[in-house]
Image: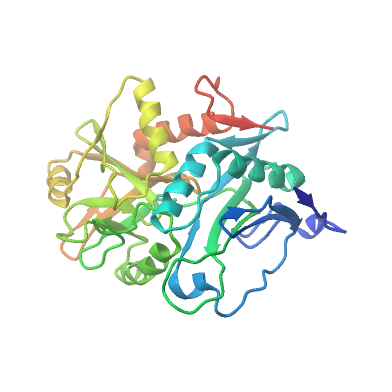
Amino acid sequence: MNLTRVEKSRITEVDFENIPFGKVFTDHMFVMNYRNGSWDDGEILPFKDLSLNPATMALHYGQAIFEGMKAELSAEGEALMFRPELNAERFNRSADRMCMPTVPVEKYITSIKEVVDLDRAWIPTKEGSCLYIRPFMFASSPYIGVKESEEYKFVIFCCPVGPYYSKPVSVFIEDTYARACKGGVGFAKAAGNYGGSLYPARLAKELGYDQVLWTDAVEHEYVQEIGTMNVFFVLDGKIVTPATNDNILEGTTRKTVIELYAKEGRTVEERPISVTELVEAYEAGKLEDAWGCGTAAAIIPMAALGNRKIRMELKPAEERSEWKKIKETLISYKRGQVEDTNNWLLRF
Ligand SMILES: *Cc1c(COP(=O)(O)O)cnc(C)c1O
């Protein structure tokens, strides 16, 4: 693989005590091109603008997918990544659905490792900070007309990010719009899913909520996920999460939370969860906890959920123990503070 280093690192320009999320980029990026039915070897080069033909197909017809991953620094100074193969596999499921070429899992992971290793001085050391990694792919053929592109670009770049502080979220139970539907692309991390979510999110904010709790597109009765996080509830002592289907993005964090509970001998019920069931549990005083989970924020407790008819306030998050316990457990695994018997960590 070709490597062109920056002449002068920009790292000295960054205030690591105060990093704005998603706006600071490390020195290098990885770019690999798909042409004539195969990927080239890819190259690492200085982070810079891409130059694109205005007819670049992704900009018109939306063949574009991405992933979100993190690298942290261990106490011993190793870079740690959590279950990167799950992201690689999901990336390829997204690619298949969007008629895009897959990237061999091994190539996907080694390419990330090489960029992160080269820019490892950029991994923030402050507690809770990390390097956010954004692999993505888009249709790069210049062509006007809806069809599968012939050329694609796979790019990886990284952003140092500060501790993700977020207050408990209040969520609007969506009753009009949908993020995903049966037969659609909700299970893929496809760019258009996020463009389509902005308008309902804006309306939810106008109604006094932080985020949207997505529901099924037909009846708006079965809950799916919160914004870009999977969702868990504790109802009468039972932990429940919506069963995944083609409407729901299967999160690495979701999967890990379920597996961590299994280690403790607790079962997470993966099944349809209706708004009616949540309201009934709330009214019976049995909606004990609720949280969203994803790579960016790990776990964020829910403060309230509601729609135009009802607003259900949960007990204050600091007085609830479930979300806190699972968050601590999850973070201790991600930081390598617990013996890695599952081989979840990639260390380098
Ligand atoms: C990325 C994402 C998640 C969380 O997935 P993780 O792998 O846990 O980061 C959940 N829902 C949506 C819609 C997402 O885009």
Q: Nearer the viewer, residue 19 or 245?
A: 245
Mark yes or no: residue 245 visible.
yes
Q: Position of residue 188 (x, y in %)?
A: 39, 53
Q: Nearest the camera: 187 or 307?
A: 187
| Rendering coords of residue 225 (x, y %) | 32, 51
- Residue drawn 51% across the image and 72% down it: 57
Does 206 sit above or below residue 325?
below
Q: Position of residue 285 (x, y in %)?
A: 17, 40
**Render colour scheme:** rainbow
Residue at 54 percent across and 22 percent down: it is: 340
- For the C terminus, the quadrant is top right
Residue 319: where, in percent of width, then height? 35, 38
Q: Is residue 128 visible?
A: no
Query: In the picture provided, is 256 more to the left or to the right than 180?
Result: right
19 above or below 299? below
Instruction: Tell me which residue sits at (31%, 57%) in the image.
Output: 171
Asked if residue 98 lies left or right of residue 116, the reply is left
